[in-house]
Amino acid sequence: MPTLQAGGSERVMSELAGYFCQKENLNVELILYGKDPEIFYPVPENLKIHLPKSEFKDRFRFYYTIERLLFLRKTVRKIKPDTVLSFGELWNSFVLIALAGLHLPVYISDRCSPTRSFNAFHTLLRNLLYPGAAGIIVQTRKAQAIYQSKFRHTRIEVIGNPIRSIEPRNGLKKENIVLMVGRLIKTKHQDKLIELFIRLSKPGWKLVIVGYDHLKQNNSQKLRSIIAENNAQEYVYLEGKKANVEEYYLKSRIFAFTSSSEGFPNVIGEAMSAGLPAVAFDCTAGPSEMITDGYNGFLVPLFDYAQFEERLEKLMIDEVLREKLGANARDSIKRFSCEKVCNDFYEFILQTGKVSDRV
């Protein structure tokens, strides 16, 4: 994949690397070929990582894109792998082009909403190249139905994301915190979350948002302006990028997620693993794979901020309900354990036949 920067897809790839590297007689190599191949997540010591030697310069974008393509092809030819796994809805086509003619089984997975729209060029590439992949991995049944109609592929497999088990730690006490974790991009709608939290006006409660600016949108400036205009600096916090996000889950009581477009949001699963009830929009795919409305959290119709606010307030004022839904969340998310999901990936890309009873 392009990079291991902080993000959901990158988290999944790091978990897969950790699982594969524990298997005997299995050599695992990771190629990072993007503009900025950052390694944010921890990876096993026995994982061999290949990085481009040159710095990508935007003013010579075409040249460096070709150079990255050739770097990827040359590296894969040197490795001579039994199987290749690629992540990235915009990058899978790049990988399929780079490896064309090498006669390798290339498995691909998009990590975005299955209804995401692409420009004409990327749509054409996907339509031409995806049918030639050895297999397509999707995260939800909804995505599987859409992709089967779109690409007419015979091997489209549903595999959810591996969710880490987040256990309580000594010294970390619960606080009245509503938490959101996610990149600061428009489709996450952190601005609306801040505004509705301010309207709720619940003394003693804080809203904490962990995430960083992405896609050159510079949303943090807008969010800080909303906080300042409402004099909310004492109870709304922007924490930026954090490596210790587990501590935020363990200190919080509720997880709020206002995103309107998702593939399979890891952060909801991680929050549930830490025993947090989640309130989330029921977007096309993702949250509904994990949240059963009223049992382990609340699913809210897309963009119904009034109901989102009502459900959030309900959890803030009702400790018994909060604890009940949180306990159900911790138990129900175990079906996406790292061991099970990573093994599903292993069986699909290295073994023959289909994996059953996955989700």
Image: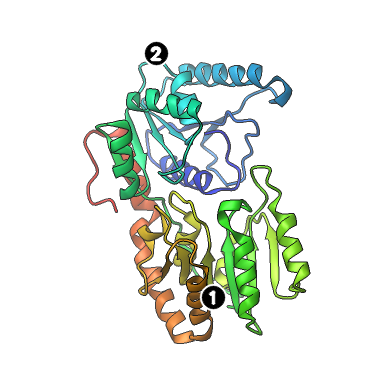
Give the residue drawn at x 40%, y 44%.
Answer: 114
Give the residue drawn at x 75%, y 72%.
Answer: 230
Q: Are marks 2 and 1 in contact (CB under 8 Å)?
A: no
Give 192 or 31, whichever is nearer the viewer.
192
Residue that label 2 marks = 101
The residue carrying pointer 1 sits among few (fewer than 14), some (14 to 19) or many (20 or more) residues within 10 Å by Cα, namely many
The three-letter amino acid code for the residue at tag 2 is Gly
Residue that label 1 marks = 253
Q: Quadrant of residue 328?
A: bottom left
Badge 1 element: loop
Give 112 or 53, whichever is nearer the viewer.
112
Q: Is residue 225 above or below residue 73?
A: below
The three-letter amino acid code for the residue at tag 1 is Arg
Query: Any mark on residue 4, and which?
Result: none
What is the basis of the colouring in this image?
Answer: rainbow
Q: Position of residue 222 (x, y in %)?
A: 72, 57
Badge 2 element: loop
Q: Is residue 201 above or below residue 348?
A: below
**What is the spatial separation of the Cα atoms under label 2 and label 1, in whole angstroms?**
52 Å
| Quadrant containing the C terminus in the rendered view | bottom left
Give the residue drawn at x 50%, y 77%.
Answer: 310
**Residue 197 in sight from this viewpoint:** yes
Give the residue drawn at x 37%, y 52%.
Answer: 339
Q: Position of residue 243 (x, y in %)?
A: 63, 55
**How many marks do you count on the picture?**
2
